[in-house]
Structure formats: structure tokens, C-alpha cells
Image: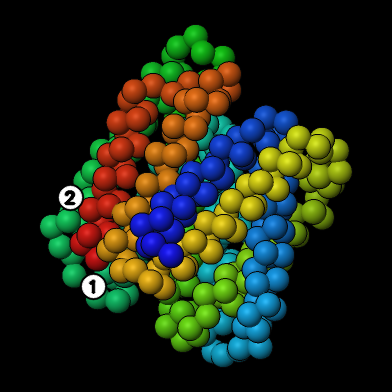
Amino acid sequence: MNVIFLSLSTALFYGLDPFFIKKGLFENHNPIVATIISLTVNLFFFFTLSIITSQFIHVGGGLIFFILAGLFAPGLGRIFSYKGIDKLGASISAPLQGTETLFSFLLAVIFLQEKISPPIVIGTGSIFLGIIILKRETERQQDGPDQWVRNKKYLWLPIISAGLYGTSVFLRKLGLNEIQSPILGAMTTSLTSWGLIILFLTKREIRRDFISMNKKAICFFLLSGGCTSLAWLSLFYALSIGKVVMVAPLQNSHPLFTVLLSSLFLRKVERVSYKTFIGAILIIGGISSLSMGD
């Protein structure tokens, strides 16, 4: 299959995830419940694939990296991400979530001694400029009459999530250097995250919200899990046939899909301004520049 098609498919599925989560949270206001359901879908999806492809029998020392990656994300990272979507809206949270590439690059520079090139400097500056614009946009909307008020203090939620995801991606790369099995790596990471997040069900209020979910919320959270599963699958196949410098800029355009979908279908839930678009484009451009500097 065409690498461009697979990369854009990854971006589309990643872009759909915050959209479905926002719709689901409107029905059931609990990001942890959303995380548990979406992770369960991911685990079932990759466990089935690992059995079909017989990759579940492959074991090795590299599995420890996938287990460590699962402790960071998608489990904990997805909770902060979904809380950010709930508090800030999908159009603000998604571009900030996309800064995970910045954290991956920082770890690569520090621990793998990769060189800092001009595209990396430009990309980093563009990302921070985009963050500043989104921060000011949340402050402006906080003073406005919009009933769906965004609070600037919640900007840290998607940024923390991005840090967790960026660290997780770095650890997955170390694991793939030891075990050439993306599906096994994805399943191990999903299993670790699922095992960690399922502990939240020991809390009475979480169990209550989980049991009291309506059908709409369940459908949206299941769709979210399906989208993230397909995004991972498309991304791994794209990387298997194409270069990172081509795949990364395309798949990291997913915040733009989220912003577009939010402006079209979430008008009653959140407001998307032209400054939000500018901030999102600056962050996406910065991520692309980082990828070209890799």
C-alpha cells in the first residue's frame, strides 16, 4: 500500500480519537472510564492480531522496554489527554498533545546523542509559538460570554500527556531494536497500560460511573478505541515501507483533522476561532520541521 495513504490514514484515525472522546464525555463526564474502554479495545485488537500472526510466541529481553512504555502511555498519558479534551476542548488539546514529538526528540538528543540541526531549532520555536497562541486564546475565551469556558490552568494536562507519550515512544523504539515485532510490542504496551488503569476500578465512584454509562457514551468510547487501534496499525505499516522523514510529518498532522472536525461538528460544545487554527498549524509545522531534522 502507498506510504502516503497509510500515513494520512494514521493522521485521520488519530484525529478522530479526540472528536469521539469529546462526544462521549458529553454523555459520561469521566475521562478514566473513557480510558479503560478505549484501552480494552486496543488490547483485544492487538491480542487478536498477535495470535493470528503467531507473534505472541516471540519473547525476549526487549519486552521490558514495552512494559516500561506501557506504564507511561497510552494508560496514564491517555487519562491526561482525555481530561485535557474534557476541560479545554478537542480543538485546543489535540495540537498540544501533538508536541509529544518534541519530547521524543529531546530524549533522543540526551540519551542517543543525536545532533541538533537547524530544522530542530526552527521546529521547537514554532511549537512553542503555537502553544503561546493557544494559551492566549484560552485566556481570551475565559473572559468572553461563551458558556463553554476554557481555563488556562488546564493547558498542562495535554502537555503532561505529550511528555508521557513522548517517553513511551522513545522506550518503544528501544524495544523494537531488540524485538522486530511491532504487533507484539503494541500488545505488550497495551496490556501493561490496561493492567495499570484497571486498578482505578477499585474506586467506588469510578465503578459507579462505569456501570451507569448510557449507550451513546459506550459507542463513542468504543469508536475511540477502534480509531487508536487502526492508527497504530497504519503507522507501523507505513514505517515498515517508508522513511521516517516522510511518514512522521504526515501522521503528525492529526491535530488539524481534530480542529476541522471540531469546527464542523462540535459547535454546540466548543468554539473554534481562527487563532486556534493558526496555533494548530504552527505546532504541526514545528513537528514536521523536527521530523525533517531527524
Residue 266 found in image quarter: top right
Vertical arrangement, residue 178 with respect to residue 268, above or below: below
Q: Is residue 77 left or right of residue 240?
A: right
Residue topped by disc 2: 122
Give, as a three-letter code, the residue at label 1. Answer: Glu
Vertical arrangement, residue 213 with respect to residue 8, above or below: above
Residue 160 in the image: state x and y as whole percent. 47, 50
Quarter of the image with the N terminus in it:
bottom left
- Residue positioned 46% across, 79% down in the render: 176
- Residue positioned 56% across, 37% down in the render: 19
Q: Is residue 206 left or right of residue 20?
A: right
- Residue positioned 26% across, 48% down in the render: 286
Nearer the N terminus, badge 2 or badge 1? 1
- The reply to whether callout 2 and callout 1 are in contact (CB within 8 Å) is no
Q: Which mark is residue 114?
A: 1
Q: Residue furthest front?
A: 1
Residue 60 in the image: state x and y as whole percent. 56, 90
The number of discs equals 2
- Residue positioned 56% across, 82% down in the render: 63
Task: Tell me the element at label 1.
Answer: loop
Examine the rendering and report whether any part of residue 95 can be seen: yes
Q: Which of the pair 173/68 is nearer the observer? A: 173
**Cα–Cα span, label 2 and label 1:** 16 Å
Q: Residue furthest left?
A: 118
Residue 141 found in image quarter: top left
Q: Which of the pair 50/164 is nearer the observer? A: 50
Q: Which of the pair 20/167 is nearer the observer? A: 20
Give, as a three-letter code, the residue at label 2. Answer: Ile
Residue 66 found in image quarter: bottom right
Q: Which of the pair 251/36 is nearer the observer? A: 251
Q: Residue furthest top?
A: 145
